[in-house]
Amino acid sequence: MKQKVALILLVFLIFINMGNCIIFADEIYKDNIEDIEYMDDMDLYLDDDSSEIMELKESIIEKARILEVKKLDDDLIENDFFIESMMVKLEILSGDYKGMEFEIIHSLTGSFGYDIIVEPGDKVLVTIEDYGDGELEVHISEYLRHTHVYIVILLFIILLILLGGFQGLKTIITLILTIFLVLKVLLPGLLAGYNPIILTLVISFIITFVTIIIIGGFNTKSYAAIMGVLGGVLVSGIIAYIAGSKAKLTGMSSEEGMMLMYIPNGVDFDFKGLLFSGIIMGTLGAVMDVGISIASAMEEIKIANPEISKKALMKAGMNVGKDIMGSMANTLILAYTGSAMPLLLLFTAYQDPWTRIINLDIIATEVIRAFAGSIGLILSIPITVLVGGMLEHKFIKEEKEVKTND
């Protein structure tokens, strides 16, 4: 039990530390900003009261605790854009300004999605802007949520290790590797301007190979699963790319996609390639699940009945795949539907005609993304079964070697 507790703490610390060394776009922006001429004026601030240009020396984000909140009279609200303003007293909890208290005016616009409603005792993130000579401006920028996020992550780790034991630990290792490759290799590579298709395929191959080998070991089961996964993912990507090109999808249907056009790195993104990349990464997990499940089932069937013919084994593998197919295809469709739920509610509320809805860039993108991923998942089943059937004679050989070594 002590060993499991130690493992849980160790893995949790690794997760937390990974968050401190992640490369995000703003860090790359800081490294490259001196090369971007048009950003030279971004650090200038116009003070409305003095009409003087003030140079922003530093802008940092720190943690803070709300101490007092006092509502201001409506007559004191200078901007008609705000519906309510309050005087907020807060204490900085981190960084160079730790322990300092500030009184700031915090305003609300009436937009539930953007307003940050605070009460005494709340913890928030604040942006501190330093204009030099002791001139500081503090703004509440977000609720402090990381504690609750870490609690969920810790619960996930505890359950994996307590219920899965050593296999659960291996699962966590593969998860850490996946997060590392995405955050430290894939995203920085895309921001650096590398081809998203080639980069995503390489990352997908590494994730698939390492994950299945760590979970299943170097054996026929793993090889069959790897071939099935890579085949299914590649097919889904090709279908999505061809269909997206024919349908003239832009790859910029979301707000985030549009914002990529204006990031200060000066990267000329291949947005259709980014769409391909997103489909590959979104499909990979589900396809891996299908591949390893079918390969494991075929191995167990062969070990339980060594005399079974290749044809019967492959038929059994396909039967297992058919059972998995329905639920996993629904998993992908429901996942994409869940992410687009607010948009679907808008269309339903305004009763837009189906012809208009299905032809919208954002809807067509999500439909092709969901069904291309499901096609890849479906095709990974016969590929895995075919490879497993071709290598079926090795299942018994490997089982005998394991028993001999034991």
Image (cartoon, grey):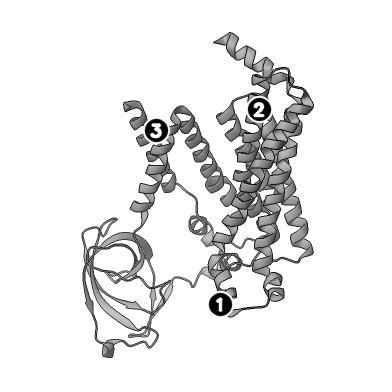
Whole-percent x and y of residue 385? 73, 33
Depth-wise, is mark 1 or mark 2 nearer the camera? Answer: 1
Look at the picture and state if 249 lies above or below 315.
below
For label 2, the crowd category at 10 Å Cα-Cα, with few meaning under 14, some 14 to 19 and many 20 or more, is many
Q: Amino acid at mark 2?
A: Lys
User: Is label 1 in a helix, a strand or a loop?
Assistant: helix
How far apart marks 1 and 2 lie (CA) works out to 49 Å
Tell me: 143 left or right of 200. left
Q: Amino acid at mark 1?
A: Ala
The residue sitting at the bottom extreme is 75
Label placed on residue 221: 2
How far apart marks 2 and 3 lie (CA) works out to 26 Å
Depth-wise, is mark 1 or mark 3 nearer the camera? Answer: 1
User: Is label 2 in a helix, a strand or a loop?
Assistant: helix
Q: Earlier in the sequence, mark 1 or mark 2?
A: 2
Q: Quadrant of the N terminus?
A: top left
Whole-percent x and y of residue 46? 40, 80
User: Is label 3 in a helix, a strand or a loop?
Assistant: helix
For label 3, the crowd category at 10 Å Cα-Cα, with few meaning under 14, some 14 to 19 and many 20 or more, is some
Q: Quadrant of the C terminus?
A: top right
> What residue did someone put label 3 on?
162
> What residue did someone put label 1 on?
349
